């Protein structure tokens, strides 16, 4: 498969894509009076870097056999991915306006009925086991595409993820990349107060993974790390992306409330202004 | 049934290079013929049934027909959400294989009994339940499942079940397969390894087996029931959520509902220690 980047693989290109993802996500949750905007803003930069050149995917052939497989395990943050799919040509932008409405294809947890989406999630702890199966299939068939799974931090309370972590290392699945969106805030309290993951880096190294940590809002660092995976032959890669829940909107950042609340029209206007979105789309 | 299963699976895998077997660290003295012949399509996922099922779904999404294999409850209830969300919702060709249906594992106890598995599996919209009544139905079911890949559940007894057919029967979901001639108006209808009990209790009634069924084949049952006066169902499963209940639901609210007389295991077996034959007797399945 010819790799045609969907957007300029540059900081400026993906930073602009991230701005558009944030703007679309904010509009979608406002219209639908939906939850989880904080979780979507947390991953907007990661998703922008993925769809802005790292993933080998083609909007004109979303099922191309040679494509990279991207799985959003934290399915509740789906508006970020729906927005990316619309901004990169997989689905019409107008479809976003139907988000969460009766009979829309855009379920409020990510749905495989949408072109470009590999796998429906919503229950946590499903993306990595499924992605492990994809990565194993690729290995067995000698295929060169990679599987990238984006998980939340709280979902590492699920035992199924640890089962998959053991399996992926045991089978040397270096074509598997797991990105952990480490915003350190769960549904009620912080990760540390809920079910501690630390020491995360050494824990995964002990599990046999290659581990890197970075600022999950730093586009250059994200691109370098994700484009360069695998980082160690024979090892799956874990990218610990330190992020801020609600990133980009001052009154949403690090606030559990915005795991649930949807913005008022006034709050939407303020949020759009803060992320630098002025056009009325 | 176990031996027929692995023989048939090996034969099918020789003809279909996308068939893979993923086991949950079980199957000693059963799965070796597959593992030895097709090492590249055999995976031991370890004692990790959730990941076994999730990764089977992932492989299936890339073109494999994956058979997951473990004992009784382990590949079903333990990983029920992975079957529901990953396999059934995505309509992927994963066949969950449970060995030790009903109370086959006898005195090993409740942890090893599969007496609620139909209830779980028949609640999934795209799931085909394959519950063969003898080794030849096992072969027939496997051939059908491979020819019609999709979410499916294959429930096996253990080993040494008698044959009730002379040849491999022609099976399809919802189809009643005649096993023994008799009164066509008052009949026995069995699924799974309860077929022996159905024959034992049949008296002059005709005996049918339904090895393939599920939610999708429910709507074709009322036409079958309309032709009978009485249908006694037989299953080594609890009545709640079971096969007889499924059949009754197909005609719920109509006079035909009264025709269905379910024989199923009493929930008393859940608290008893005994061998399979004793549990089936004390549970009310066999006289």
Image (cartoon, coloured by chain):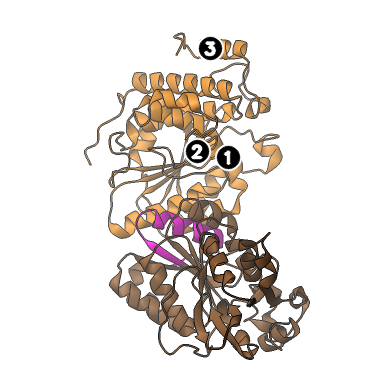
In the image, the segment drawn in magenta is: B44-67
Labelled pair 1, 3 in contact (Cβ < 8 Å): no
Q: Which mark is residue A274?
A: 3
| For discs 1 and 3, the disc positioned in front in the rendered view | 3
Shown in brown, the chain is B
Q: Which mark is residue B244?
A: none
Provide the secondary structure element on which disc 2 rests. Answer: loop
The residue pinned by badge 2 equals A110
Labelled pair 2, 1 in contact (Cβ < 8 Å): no
Q: Earlier in the sequence, mark 2 or mark 1?
A: 2
The percent position of residue B7, horizontal first and vertical second, equals: 39, 82
Marks 3 and 2 sit apart, C-alpha to C-alpha, by: 27 Å
State whether residue A190 is above or below residue B14. above
Please name the residue shown 23% across and 42% down the image: A1
Q: Which mark is residue A153?
A: 1
The percent position of residue A189, horizontal first and vertical second, equals: 70, 34
Marks 1 and 3 sit apart, C-alpha to C-alpha, by: 26 Å
Q: Colour of chain A?
A: orange
Please name the residue shown 37% across and 23% down the image: A14
């Amino acid at each position: 498969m010819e790799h045609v980047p969907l957007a300029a693989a540059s900081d400026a290109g993906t930073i602009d894509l991230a701005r558009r993802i944030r703007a679309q996500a904010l509009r979608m949750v406002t219209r639908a009076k939906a939850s989880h905007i904080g979780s979507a803003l947390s991953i907007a930069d990661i998703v922008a870097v993925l769809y802005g050149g790292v993933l080998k995917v083609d909007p004109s052939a979303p099922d191309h056999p040679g494509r990279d497989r991207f799985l959003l395990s934290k399915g509740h943050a789906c508006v970020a991915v729906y927005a990316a799919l619309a901004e990169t040509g997989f689905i019409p932008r107008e479809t976003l306006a139907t988000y969460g409405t009766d009979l829309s294809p855009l379920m409020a947890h990510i749905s495989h009925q949408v072109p470009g989406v590999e796998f429906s999630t919503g229950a946590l702890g499903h993306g990595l086991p499924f992605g492990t199966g994809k990565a194993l299939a690729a290995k067995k068939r000698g295929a060169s595409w990679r599987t990238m799974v984006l998980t939340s931090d709280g979902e590492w309370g699920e035992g199924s993820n640890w089962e998959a972590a053991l399996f992926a290392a045991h089978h040397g699945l270096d074509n598997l990349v797991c990105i952990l969106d480490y915003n350190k805030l769960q549904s009620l309290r912080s990760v540390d107060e809920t079910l501690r993951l630390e020491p995360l880096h050494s824990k995964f190294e002990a599990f046999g993974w290659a581990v890197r940590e970075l600022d999950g809002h730093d586009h250059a660092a994200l691109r370098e790390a994700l484009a360069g995976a695998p980082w160690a032959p024979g090892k799956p890669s874990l990218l610990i992306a330190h992020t801020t829940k609600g990133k980009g909107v001052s009154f949403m950042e690090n606030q559990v409330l915005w795991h649930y609340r949807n913005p008022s029209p006034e709050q939407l206007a303020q949020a759009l202004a803060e992320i630098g979105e002025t056009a009325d789309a | 049934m176990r031996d027929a299963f692995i023989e048939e699976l090996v034969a099918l895998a020789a003809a279909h290079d996308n068939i893979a077997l993923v086991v949950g660290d079980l199957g000693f003295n059963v799965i070796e013929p597959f593992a030895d012949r097709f090492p590249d399509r055999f995976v031991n996922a370890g004692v990790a049934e959730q990941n076994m099922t999730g990764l089977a779904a992932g492989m299936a999404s890339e073109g494999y027909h994956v058979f997951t294999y473990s004992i009784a409850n382990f590949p079903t209830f333990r990983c029920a959400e992975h079957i529901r969300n990953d396999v059934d919702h995505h309509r992927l060709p994963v066949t969950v294989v449970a060995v030790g249906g009903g109370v086959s594992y006898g005195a090993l106890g409740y942890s090893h009994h599969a007496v609620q598995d139909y209830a779980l599996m028949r609640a999934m919209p795209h799931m085909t339940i394959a519950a063969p009544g003898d080794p030849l139905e096992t072969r027939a079911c496997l051939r059908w499942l491979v020819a019609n890949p999709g979410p499916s559940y294959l429930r096996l007894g253990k080993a040494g079940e008698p044959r009730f057919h002379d040849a491999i029967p022609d099976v399809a979901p919802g189809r009643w397969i005649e096993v023994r001639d008799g009164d066509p108006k008052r009949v026995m209808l069995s699924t799974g390894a309860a077929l022996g009990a159905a024959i034992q209790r049949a008296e002059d009634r005709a005996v049918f087996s339904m090895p393939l069924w599920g939610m999708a084949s429910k709507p074709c049952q009322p036409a079958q029931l309309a032709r009978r006066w009485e249908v006694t169902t037989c299953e080594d499963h609890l009545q709640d959520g079971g096969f007889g209940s499924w059949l009754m639901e197909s005609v719920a609210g109509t006079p035909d509902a009264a025709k269905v007389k379910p024989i199923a295991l009493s929930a008393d077996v859940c608290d008893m220690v005994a061998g399979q034959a004793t549990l089936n007797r004390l549970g009310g399945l066999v006289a």
